[in-house]
Amino acid sequence: MSLPLAFWDSSALVPLCAAQPQTNSAWALHLKYQVVTWWATEVEIRSALTRLKRMGDITSGQFVIAKKIAQELAQVWLSIHESASVTRDACSLLETHPLSAADALQLAAALETCQHTPRGFVFVSGDLRQTEAAREIGFTVEFV
């Protein structure tokens, strides 16, 4: 049986790779939903893992393991690629919600995933500002 699709923000995927307070809830959601994400998520995850290592929150050994887990996840998730419609939607979202460019691009990719019908489609994130915007747009939000 195939899991239902959900759009995952990188903030919800990082805890799958490196132990954090949200790790248990992230894994519970991972068992519930198939991951759809945007094309730059692997870069965002690597950035977050590198930051955790630099800050001393994970060791060099944990960093190596976390990178491997991220690569394994990337092999099975569905990815929304850049397109003119994602760019257009992201620009619109920036005008209506207090989002960073990357967050707007992710929400635009999520809209692309559900064919611009967010009602009932799940958006998984650990970012409060992004989940607020996703809720306002009409997504069902699962907070990690």
Image (cartoon, grey):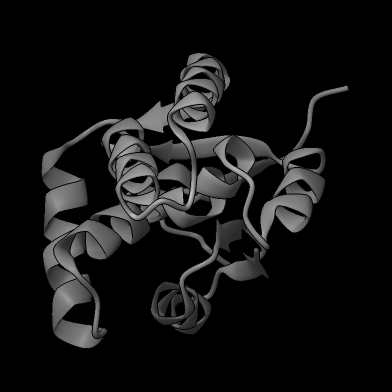
Q: Residue at x 26, y 84 (%)?
A: 97
Q: Is residue 102 above or below residue 69?
A: below
User: Residue 30 lies in what quarter of the image?
Assistant: top right
Tell me where residue 51 appears, x and y as whole percent.
Answer: 31, 49
Residue 53 in picture, x, y percent from top left: 37, 43
Asked if residue 137 is positioned above or below residue 72 in the image, the reply reads below
Q: Which residue is rendered at x = 24% and y = 76% of the image?
A: 99
Q: Position of residue 103 (x, y in %)?
A: 29, 63
Quadrant for residue 82, please give it. Answer: top left
Q: Quadrant of residue 102?
A: bottom left
Is 118 left or right of 93, judged from the image as shown?
Answer: right
How far from the left and from the top, in percent, is residue 128? 48, 79
Q: Front-most of 46 and 82? A: 46
Which residue is nearer to you in this view: 110 or 118?
110
**In the rendered picture of this protein, how many numbered marks are placed on residues?**
0
Q: Is residue 8 above or below residue 100?
A: above
Residue that protrudes farthest toward the right in the picture: 1
Q: Quadrant of the N terminus?
A: top right
Q: Quadrant of the C terminus?
A: bottom right
